[in-house]
Image (cartoon, helix red, strand yellow):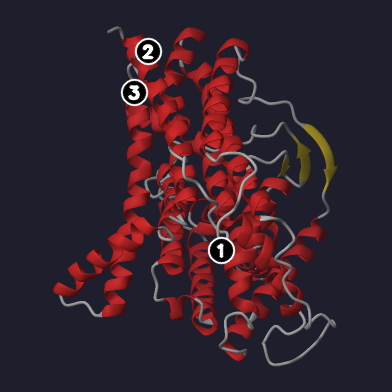
Amino acid sequence: MTRRRRLLVAAAAALALLALAPQVASAHGLVGRADLPIPTWLFGWAAAIVLGVSFALLGALWRKPRLEEPHERRVVRIPRVVDAICGAIGIAYFGIVVYAGFAGSGVPTANIAPTSIYVIFWVGTVVLSILFGDVFRVFSPWRSFAVAVAFVARPIARNWRTRPYPDRVGRWPAAVGIVCFAWMELAYAPTERTDPQHLAIVAVAYAVVQLVGMAVYGIERWTTRADAFGVYFNMFSRLSPWERRDGVLYLRPPLSGAPRWDGMVSGSVALLCAGIGSTSFDGFSNGVAWADLSPHLQDFFKTLGAGQEAALELAATVGLLFFVGLVFVFFRLGIQGMRMVGHGHEPRELLGRFAHSLIPIAFAYALAHYFSLLLFQSQAMGYLISDPLGKGSDLFGTAGSGIDYNAISGDGIWYVQVGALVCGHVAGLILAHDRALVTYEDTGEATRSQYWMLVVMVGFTSLGLWLLSAVNH
């Protein structure tokens, strides 16, 4: 069998896997089971067809790179006072959340801190980054505070010298930070992970670490390499049509910022694997497969002397790290396959060159998994802003508001989730194909190399659909 035929067989097998994966699917994040107007297996076939057709069209019609050097249109120069106002808002909101965590009610649903951190910050900022660009940069409380201190202390700190940030460290601190946050969300003891006071302590500790890092290595260098959330949200903002650079707002083609996200920086692939893997485990941990497996892992750790709570945390830690590693292994296998095409491309180089193609996948997983949480739980901010401490106040007259669980039907959520997965993976194919056109010697080689990327995208789609379907089975 020729090499090309083997590639085609592998791609066809992966497409078949995708089509068969969700035959018994219901929607993750829903209460109960959704009765869909069409058989659920059709979602799998539709997704397979969309990816396959997209791949064929890219190979036939996308013959030159279009995203590597996109045309940008200057929109407006943003005054510096806007940064000051946004920074002040970010610092004030951070202060309210921390104060509420320490002084407010210990009931997570009555205190503004848990919803602000897990819903508005962790999930909402990802969506805002796609829609409006790197909004977190201007609202970041620790960065804004550091900039303000540097401005005020400028006359007396002229001799302050920051250290060079080690290139070999790269984005590894950000990747580790995302894994740690995911661990707190998914593996930490349930009563502790939502405890407002514990969340306040973690928030203050994280802010202190960021301030120390910026003082030692410089505000910009630390923010763009080591601040876990600054790096994470900036990564998603590369998919946005909006970019602010040197105080000027630009409009660019969607996705075109991703190729300029340097995947060769150490730790970049790890950051993406952390984002996709943690979301994958979050979905898997809600299914029956984990319900069957987790007790065995807990029993194993108990035999080593761990208590019940520690065994639960250790089992979840194993699951989390396994999914992060699984994402890397799958992407690495795809890269290994790409080496069969062309000459002179080492795995490390290809990993870095094509890492940005996983950014839409990370967003697709996040939106598919957290959509219902964001849609419903964000409504809780209506009463939480009036009673942030959970002690009976009604500052804005909205303390009596509630959550409308009829805002969207179960079927509607399912369609959004599947649509997000399919569109995210098509976007990943587009980014990978565009990069292949500048990586390989001719268009034919570039197209052949993407057989393997098609397999990778189909695999991630299959995993995402399986996670959506597994939750109620």
Gap in angstroms between the C-alphas marked 1 and 2: 52 Å
Indicate the secondary structure of the residue bearing disc 2: loop
| Residue annotated with mark 1 | 159
Q: What is the number of callouts on the image?
A: 3
Mark whose residue sits in front, 3 or 2:
3
Q: Is residue 409 above or below residue 210?
A: above
Q: Position of residue 231 (x, y in %)?
A: 54, 52
Badge number at residue 63: none
Q: Is residue 378 above or below residue 234?
A: below
Badge number at residue 337: 3
Badge number at residue 342: 2
Quadrant (top left/top right/bottom left/bottom right) for the N terminus: top left
Label 1 crowd (10 A; few <14 / some 14-19 / many >=20): few
Q: Residue at x 46, y 67 (%)?
A: 185
Q: Is residue 92 above or below residue 420?
A: below
Q: Earlier in the sequence, mark 1 or mark 3?
A: 1
Of residues 392 and 165, the one drawn nearer to the viewer in this rendering: 392
Q: Residue at x 43, y 65 (%)?
A: 186
Residue type (three-letter) at the residue carrying disc 2: Gly
Residue type (three-letter) at the residue carrying disc 3: Gly
Q: Earlier in the sequence, mark 3 or mark 2?
A: 3
Residue type (three-letter) at the residue carrying disc 1: Asn
Gap in angstroms between the C-alphas marked 1 and 3: 52 Å
Q: Position of residue 139 (x, y in %)?
A: 69, 62
Of residues 316 and 18, the one drawn nearer to the viewer in this rendering: 18
